[in-house]
Amino acid sequence: MQSSTLAILALATLLAPDGEQAAVAGTLPANVVPSAIATPQSSEVPYTVIADSQPEMLLAQAQPQLNLTQSDVRELRQLILAVANDATTATDANVQRSQSLDYSITLLNALLVILTFFPFATILLFLVVRKLVVQELVEDVKKQLHKVGELENYLDNYNEKADGYLEQLNQEIGKHKQKIKDELQDIVNRSELSKASIQQIEALKSQFMMHLQFMVSEAQSEKDKIFQELYKIKPSLTLDSPTGNGTRQVKLEKTDSPFTKADSNDFIKQAERLMKEGRHAEAIAIYQKATQQHPEVYEAWFGLGHSLSEKEQYEDAINAYDRANKLNPNRFECWYNRGNTLGKLQRYQEALENYDKALEIQPERLEIWYNRGSILRRLERYEEALAAYDKALSLSPKQPQIWYNRAQVLVSLQQLEEAIASYDRAIEITPQKAEFWVQRGIACERLKRDSEALESFDRALQVNPKEEEALRHRMNLLEKKEQYEDAVAVCDRLLSLNNNQAEVWCKRGYLLAVLKQYEEALQAYDRALSLESNSPDIWRARGAILAELKRYQEAVSAFNKAMQVQEQSFNLDRKVMQASGANQAI
């Protein structure tokens, strides 16, 4: 009981209000004893003030109840004072905090009383608080939704940009992919070309030899024709001819030359008669005698140059023309004939200069413009050549050879439609010229007007059934149109004209193979090999035919032979190239 009472007293001392403690500047008065413990319902605590002279009386009054001695009282007093001093020191630091806590407790107590005794106010307060809380939550949600909307817009913009970047990236990847693919394909193609280069070289060589043989044969045939005509007509040595038979050298025009003498005229007349008879050597001798006796006569030197040119002694002819020009430089025929002779020597630029000299004297001479166009064509100055031919046609529009040459120039300029129109003008004047029809057909073929080309080749063959170029082009067109049997018939016509054409036998073998007539195809390739045994292409084609006939042993032998021939040819070409390189080094 005593310990309980001491504890109560000590607790009362510790719970003394801060206001009273502040009044004594941090020291609990000895005469202040807590009478009760403060409760939350009251902010004021009643105290009983005891005079300083009465503590002993107070303790004495309590002594009978507590059974305390005088020393116990003193010790208790000291203990309480020490505890009070410690509490006062702690309270000074917590004054502000305790005041705030007391205020909060008071408000809460008041609120609890109101809520307890006024339930309607409690509900209303709850609704108000709920509404405020809900509004705050709604506002917060709206803010969050707004932020979410902004985020969605940002994401949409980002997605659009990302899609754009992705599309650009795909395009770039596609470009680089296609570029890499093209480069790889180019590498593959080059690799294939490098592998097939030897075969292509051999094929080109074989074709070149075949074409060379054909050209030699054709040249020989033309040469025979020329020699046959030499006995009938006067030979011509100029480049081309408006009439198609060669532009003749211009004869000496009659003039009242002061240098002409009676006896020299006799020589000239005699030499001209010999020239007409084709006795060029005798004519040259007469002209030389005339120039020796009368070196000042222009006509003698001009005639000598003409006869020497007819005899194909071109350098001497040019010297004779030079002597004539020194005597009289204002005669166009000497410049013109000298230009023709220079053309025969393939000195085309000098020939052109001589034609220009002649045109300065006679600007309206048809043959000069025509031959000038031919020289320009040989120099590949096609626009100027076309202008020269047009000038010649303005002087004489009924010249088929000029229309034909004009068409050839237009073909070189890739103006095929206009070229066909010029061929048509030439054919209109001279429809019985097979060459005109052939070249017209080739132009149509280049324009892929195959039916019209076939008609032109057929017209050429009507004029000349032995026109080989027309037959070759017709054969190729029929093959292109997959009319293989008709193409074989054309091959047979070509072989009837010349049975020693290896390339035609090869073409016949190929066409028969397409028609699956393998035995006849094999015979055609054998015939081609008899004419051209060093062609690897023919050996390979023969091997393929033997494989179709299931004669595999012979097919393997043919393929081996093709490889052997190709290797031999390759070694030969390499030696030729090495020899050529050694010669260049030397």
Image (cartoon, grey):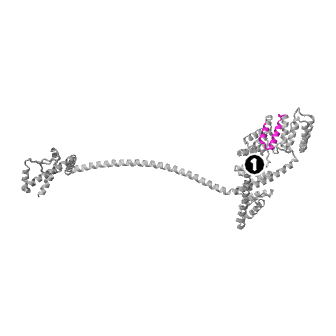
Q: Position of residue 262 (x, y in %)?
A: 92, 34
Is residue 240 in sight in this rendering? Answer: no
Measuring 39% from the left and 49% from the top, which residue is drawn there? 148
The foreground one among 361 and 299 is 299
Q: Reply yes or no: does residue 353 show up in magenta.
A: yes
214 or 433: nearer the viewer: 214
Q: Residue at x 16, y 44 (%)?
A: 25
Q: Which residue sits at x=87%, y=42%?
A: 307
How many residues crowd around disc 1 within 10 Å: few (fewer than 14), some, or many (20 or more)?
A: many
Q: Nearer the viewer, residue 564 or 430?
A: 564
428 in magenta: no
Note whether 221 is above or below 390 in the view shown.
below
Question: Measured from the top left, where is residue 379 in percent x and y?
Answer: 75, 43
Is 158 placed left or right of 141 in the picture? right
Residue closer to the observer: 265 or 69 = 69
**Does residue 528 appear left or right of residue 229 in this picture?**
left
Which element is circle 1 on? helix
Residue 436 shows in the view: yes
Amino acid type, residue under disc 1 in the picture:
Gln
What residue would you read off at disc 1?
439
Residue 413 in the image, given as x and y percentages of width and height: 71, 44
The residues colored magenta run 328-356
By secondary structure, the bulk of the magenta-drawn segment is best described as: helix
Using the image, determine if residue 308 lies above or below residue 516. above
At which x and y percent is residue 438?
Answer: 76, 50
Left or right? Give the position of 505 relative to 6. Answer: right
The quadrant of the picture occupied by the N terminus is bottom left
